[in-house]
Image (cartoon, grey):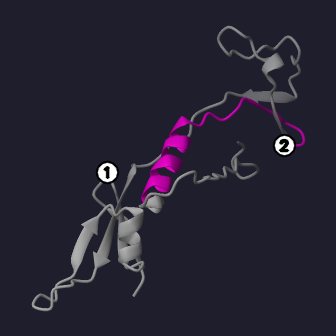
Amino acid sequence: IEPGKSAWRVRISIHIINHDGNLWDASLLCACAALGDLRLPVVEVDRRSGGVRIVSNDDLDNNDGAINNSKHNNSKFERRKGQSLTLGPLPVPLTVAVLPSNDENNSRDILLIDPTHLEEDVSSGNSVTVVCNTNKEIIEFHKKGS
């Protein structure tokens, strides 16, 4: 809001309604979609104290969202327009579950991409998640299980 003085803090809470596997990947994509849709409100900054106040809808023009200065035409306040967040490259997660082979002649493990809840259970939690972005960079690597 004010460089070096005040900033927005955004918290995302994800409530799981149904878990059918690959929960982490789905949660990451949902959080990115929510942040992409977020619009920060219009604020008013007190130039003397540096205090910040969110401007109510009553102080905005109903037609186009323009700031209505009739109520607060005081020069000690500075209005800042609401804005969307500027997000970096979109993260793309990929989870691979590692299942043990049940073939005695073949000791190679079975790899399942985007495992369901049942496949996660069968893998005993052995999985690898890689998150890349659209710039082809690995931004996270996470191994679960043994």
Q: Within the magenta stretch, is there residue 34? A: yes
Q: Quick check: can you spot residue 141?
A: no
* Amino acid beneath label 1: Thr
- The residue pinned by badge 1 equals 134
Is residue 6 shown above or below 61?
below
Q: Earlier in the sequence, mark 2 or mark 1?
A: 2
Q: Quick check: can you spot residue 18?
A: yes
Is residue 17 shown above or below 113?
above
Foreground residue, 130 or 21? 21
Q: Toward which corner of the image does residue 75 lie, by quadrant?
A: top right
Callout 2 secondary element: loop
Picture coordinates of residue 114, whole percent (x, y): 32, 61
Q: Is residue 48 left or right of residue 66?
A: right
Residue drawn at the location 32% of the way across and 72% of the way down:
97
Picture coordinates of residue 89, whole percent (x, y): 39, 49
Residue drawn at the location 86% of the way across and 16% of the way down:
73
Q: Is residue 5 left or right of residue 100?
A: right
- The residue pinned by badge 2 equals 50
Disc 2 packing (10 Å; few <14; some 14–19; many ≥20): few
In which quadrant will I find the C terminus?
bottom left
Residue drawn at the location 86% of the way across and 42% of the way down:
51
Is residue 74 shown above or below 140?
above
* Amino acid beneath label 2: Gly
Is residue 21 shown above or below 121?
above
Callout 1 secondary element: loop
Residue drawn at the location 39% of the way across and 67% of the way down:
118
Q: Which residues are magenta?
A: 25-51
